[in-house]
Every structure is written in structure tokens, then in C-alpha cells.
Amino acid sequence: MISPRVELAREKLTENELQGFIVSDRQNIRWLTGFTGSSGVALLTCDSVHLFTDSRYTIQASQEAPGAVVHISSEPPIKQVAEKVSTLGCEAVGFESTVVTVEEYRQLEDGAADVRLVGLAQALSPLRAVKDTEEIERLRKACEITDAAFSAIQPFLKPGTKELDILRELVYILTGLGAEKESFDSIVASGPRSALPHAHPTDRILAAGEPVLLDFGAQYQGYAGDITRTLFLGSATDEFRKVYQTVLDAQMAAIAAIRPGVPGKDVDEVARKIITDAGYGNSFGHGLGHQLGLSVHDGPALSPKSDIVLLEGMVVTVEPGIYIEGWGGVRIEDDVLVGRCGAEVLTVSQKSLTELAV
Amino acid sequence: MISPRVELAREKLTENELQGFIVSDRQNIRWLTGFTGSSGVALLTCDSVHLFTDSRYTIQASQEAPGAVVHISSEPPIKQVAEKVSTLGCEAVGFESTVVTVEEYRQLEDGAADVRLVGLAQALSPLRAVKDTEEIERLRKACEITDAAFSAIQPFLKPGTKELDILRELVYILTGLGAEKESFDSIVASGPRSALPHAHPTDRILAAGEPVLLDFGAQYQGYAGDITRTLFLGSATDEFRKVYQTVLDAQMAAIAAIRPGVPGKDVDEVARKIITDAGYGNSFGHGLGHQLGLSVHDGPALSPKSDIVLLEGMVVTVEPGIYIEGWGGVRIEDDVLVGRCGAEVLTVSQKSLTELAV
């Protein structure tokens, strides 16, 4: 039986009048063939799927990618695939121009001099954007574990604890709940560090009277959950309350605006307008959200520059934030499945302002 | 004060008659500027270092990269740098051809049409290969934590335990000992799964009378430790003993062959010959070892195809293995600093055959 994903991807061959498509992106290879190794290239033709890797993966490749013809060699995969498309006598072959490096391209040209190489940017992204039933189940489970971990980590959020120690407990909790691992490097940012949207946890010790921001997710069967919550240690100040409520209003309004057919940039604008109207427009420097799937950043989704139109079956994050240097930041993020009639929020952790006892 | 790394890198400009060098590789950016963000591009010129990133990193970039002029924009970093080299009136600018994608190259060409772009493969690798004092201290500490974690995980290696539960404890132990995180996705492979050189941990439950292979490392201040040990649950079989001793002999002989001036492929050959003479030549499918540093695979080192000549100050792994499908595998790996007179082994965990009580 031919996998529906392979069938979908083959439409790209017809569309672009190609006899083959070289897949280099790791997540695309996994999506198409099932192979999870760290080194390999796949080739899709109109009647077969080939997987080129090395002897570290001899056994794993045939187990994980039963639908592919596995080729093992000590030659770099890109050289193997160049030789194959040349041998097959392909006239025109696509490759992923946002993944293949200039040096790999040179090797492709060398090895397949008689083949016309056609760079396609993100050809598989639209296919991966709409999740199938198996993917949605995995994402649901990833979000379920993520929520449970958020609940279980709260007793560790107290003055005197190091950010790095919270990270340590968080990872232990995630994997204890069935996550393979963190879906990305978790963020634990306390006090003024919460103003750094992508803060690595440090030795900084949490103190009463300041916020702590957690941004993390479970990876489950390859799929990424992703949640952010910002809590306050003790009684929140008036300014924190105002910032928090603004972010929350923006987030909830954006979620309410999600449905199939709506442009991603319109959803961003819903949130951005609320934040701008409250006077914090310059403090929300990133996009509202990204797609979620095998990668935590599975593609663009909700941002001023996005040209994505939401489709049923997409899964996106909704994560507005306000960041004030020296003072701190607030971000609230949920994962949302675009359902036929609107958003289904997959992460369900409490998001009304939480003031932790200190 | 100009950092010695920037001074070293500037020699590449002179060597290649360039007015600038665009650095896209994340670890190269960190090595050169200190910036650890996930998105950014650096530009080295003869009198300045520029760092292009986005507003998520406004604060972090100036903190981490005080020697660089930081540019924040919502434009992709590659477009920012293209504009800069054009504005600066550079005649010829280098870029990393093994990192820059075909699509990024197109954007460079578009934005800097008047600049000659010169692809350099791995230009900074030879500079990064020889570690400075700070790097060696960090690697020492990474290896020290790695050794301590290996010791602490052993009580969990017993029949009835899941591979994934061992992984969970291992990560908790590593971070408790001061690691930022695993330096790569740890391998825990039991029984026949030890024949998969890059096995992800699974739900498989350890049983008496079989091997368990651990391959993991601590990341400390960005630097990677990397160790492998293969232990036996109960009394080792004769075949296991023979395979184990062969791998151990090969590993120790290879370490003894390490000193400045020796070609990496000769060290590989020392190990490979011992394994081949014992009749397992076809069961050792990978190279003997790689360089270690900010990346766990910090560059090639010891393999039949390597053209590296060992230099004082390099740090490499030495990790021969024998893998027999359906039966299992043995790999033994240490991290080695190339010292003036020979190898200094940085990982010191016991490597004589360990038979765990069951």
C-alpha cells in the first residue's frame, strides 16, 4: 500500500513536471518515509521512494522506512542521490532550496550533470501543514503531557530556587509523563530576564515580587507541544496586572478569530491591535504564532508578514507577549487546532493571572 | 581589546583577499562573537564584527556579544548582511558554502549584486579545531560531569528497567551535576538493540544475560562531553568477552597512537586493523572518532577518509565498535586531548569489562 503522504507528495512531481524530488530536510524525510536518523536523503520518484544513508542506520532505516528502498554507503547521501537520479535518466529533479547548501548543490551538479535541477522552496510545507488523524492524536498527547507537566512543576516555582533547577525538574517531569524529551530547549526566565523572549535558564535565583515565565513542551512520538505561562511570585503589582491582562485579552481575542479561511496575518492583527491600543505596541516584537508539528517551528502561521491562510487541520501556536527591558515580560501561549468551526485549544492549563504563595 | 579568535579569523580575510566574511553557522557565530541565539548571521570585516538578528535577541545579543555591532531587524539576517556588505562597498566577501542554503545564496546575490561572493567550505574549522585554554577547561569539566553521571547511572542498569527510564534518570543526573543538558540525544540500547550504532532509547526492558550500551555526554558552558560504555547484565558470554576485548584493545591501541603530527586516518587504521584481524572488520562500519567542542561532532578527525593531521590542543573521540545484527554490539568511547607528548584521556570511567549484578 502506498502511503497517502507519498501520494500527496507525488502531486508535486506532476505539478512541476519533475521525474524526481530530492528530500533533504530531516523532518520532511521523517514525514515522508518514517526514517528518524540524523543523516540521510530521500528521493521520491513516480514509482518509488529511495532512502540514502550510511551503515550506522542499516538496521534502523529498514525498520522505520519499510516503504523505501534503502541504500547504505559511506558516500555522502547527497552524492548517492545525485548518482541515482543520473542513473535513472531523470530529465528534471526538484530539490529543497531552503535546505540544500551551496556545497551540496555543487555536489548534485557534479554527480548529475545531465539532470536539470529545480530548486523548490518549502514544497512539502503545505502538505505537512494540514495534519492527518495520526498526527493530530500525537499532538493532542504532546499537549496533554505538556499541560500535566505545567501543573506538576508549579510547586518548584518559589523564591530561592534557581532557574536551572526548575528546568531540571521540568525535564524529569516531562519524561516521567511519557514525553520523549523537551520539544525544544525550555525557557525558564525570572524577574527582568522574562523580558528576553528566548532566555536560556541560568543560575539566577527566583525572588518574591517578580514574574517567572515558562515556555516549554513535550515531544511525543516526534510531535511537539509548546506552552507558555507567566506567573507571579507573590502579589502582582498593578503594572504587571495591566500588562498581563493586555496579553491575555490579546491572546483570547486572537484564538476567537481563528477559523478556516482566515489569513494568518489577520489573526496576528487582532492581537497586535489590542496590545498597541493599550500602549505596548513597540514591546511585542515577534509574530503571534507558528505552526506546530514534527518541528516546534513547523512553518509560519500568524504574523504580520505571513501569507498563510488557515485551513482545517492546521495546528498553530498563539503567543502574544509584552517585553520591557529591565522590568520583565509576559507571554501567554496555547496550541490551537484549526477545526471546521473555529479553534480547538489543545493546551488547557489555567491562564488567568496566577499569584503563587511565597 | 580584540579577541584572539577574531584576530585568527581575520587572517582568513587576508588569505583569501576578502573584505568581509559572512558567518552563518551557529557554533561559528558563538565561537567568534559569544552570541548563542538560534537565529543570526555575523559579518567579520578587517575592522569590525557585526551581528544581525531579530528583536527576540535585542538584549541577549548585546550582553553576549559585547565586541560586535548588533543590528536588530525583522528582515531575515541574510538580507541584512547582504545590504551591509553592499553598503560597505566590499569587493569580495566570503560565505560558508557548507552552511548557506541555495535560497539564502540567492538572497545574498540579490542584496549584494555588486559584491563578489566567495564560497569557503569550513573556513573556521581549522581555527576551532585547536582549543584555547578556556575551551579546554570547559571540555575538561564537561568530561568530568560525564564521568560522574556514568558512575551515578549504574544502579539503574538492571533487569526490568526500561531504556527510556534510564534515559530519564541519566538526564536528571547530568543536570544535577551541573550540565546545561545532554550534549546530544543520549543512546541507551539494550540487548540486540546495541547493534544499532545510533539507537534512540525505547520502551524495551533490560533483561539479564544481555549487554546495555550507553552513549551520552554533558554539555557544559556550550562544550560537549561524549562517552560510550557497554556493560553486561550478569555473566558475560564467551562471545561477548571476545568482542569486548577486541574493541577495548583497538581503543587503547588507538589512544596510544595519538600525538601531534599523526594523520587521523593512521589512528583509525590502528584500531581497524585490530578489529579486522579478530575477524570483525565488516562489523565496524563507522569512523573511529570525531572532533569535540561546541558541537559534539565538531569536525572530522579519525576515519579512513580523514585528511586531518592531529595538532596539539585538538580534542577528539576514540570510539571503535563491533555491531552484529540480531546479537548486539559493543562500543567503547573516550574523549582525548592531543597533548604535546601524546593523548591525555579526559573521560576516565572504568572500561574493563563490567558485569553488573542481576
Image (spheres, coloured by chain):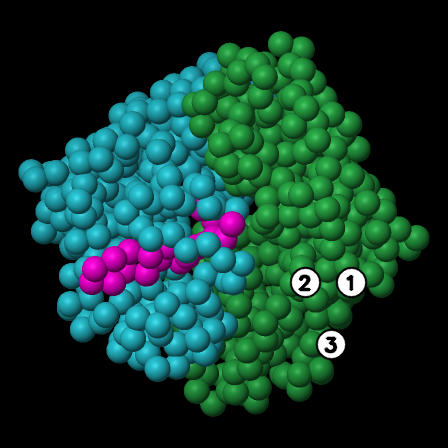
Chain colours: A cyan, B green
Residue at point 18%, 73% (across, down): A17
Q: Which residues are magenta?
A: A37-55
CA distance for labels 2 and 1: 8 Å
| Mark 1, residue position | B263
Which image quarter is the N terminus of chain A in?
A: top left
Q: Label for residue B306?
A: 2
Residue B234 appears left or right of B76: right
Residue A173: x and y in percent read 46, 21
Residue B256 appears left or right of A104: right
- The answer to whether residue A253 of the structure is visible from this angle is no
Badge 1 local density, few (<14 within 10 Å), some, or many (20+)?
some
- The answer to whether residue A261 of the structure is visible from this angle is yes
Badge 3 local density, few (<14 within 10 Å), some, or many (20+)?
few
Q: Nearer the viewer, residue A332 or A237?
A: A332
Residue B254: x and y in percent read 79, 48
Mark 2 lies on a secondary structure that is loop
Q: Nearer the viewer, residue B286 or A351?
A: B286
Q: Nearer the viewer, residue A203 or B260?
A: B260
| Mark 3, residue position | B11
Q: Amino acid at mark 3?
A: Glu
Residue at point 47%, 73% (across, down): A107
- Give the letter of the chain under mark 1: B
Task: Locate residue B312: give its quadrant.
Answer: bottom right
Q: Earlier in the sequence, mark 3 or mark 1?
A: 3
User: Looking at the image, is B32 positioned above or below residue B36?
Assistant: below
Q: Earlier in the sequence, mark 3 or mark 2?
A: 3
- Give the letter of the chain under mark 2: B
Q: Nearer the viewer, mark 3 or mark 1?
A: 1
Residue B187 appears left or right of B330: left
Mark 1 lies on a secondary structure that is loop
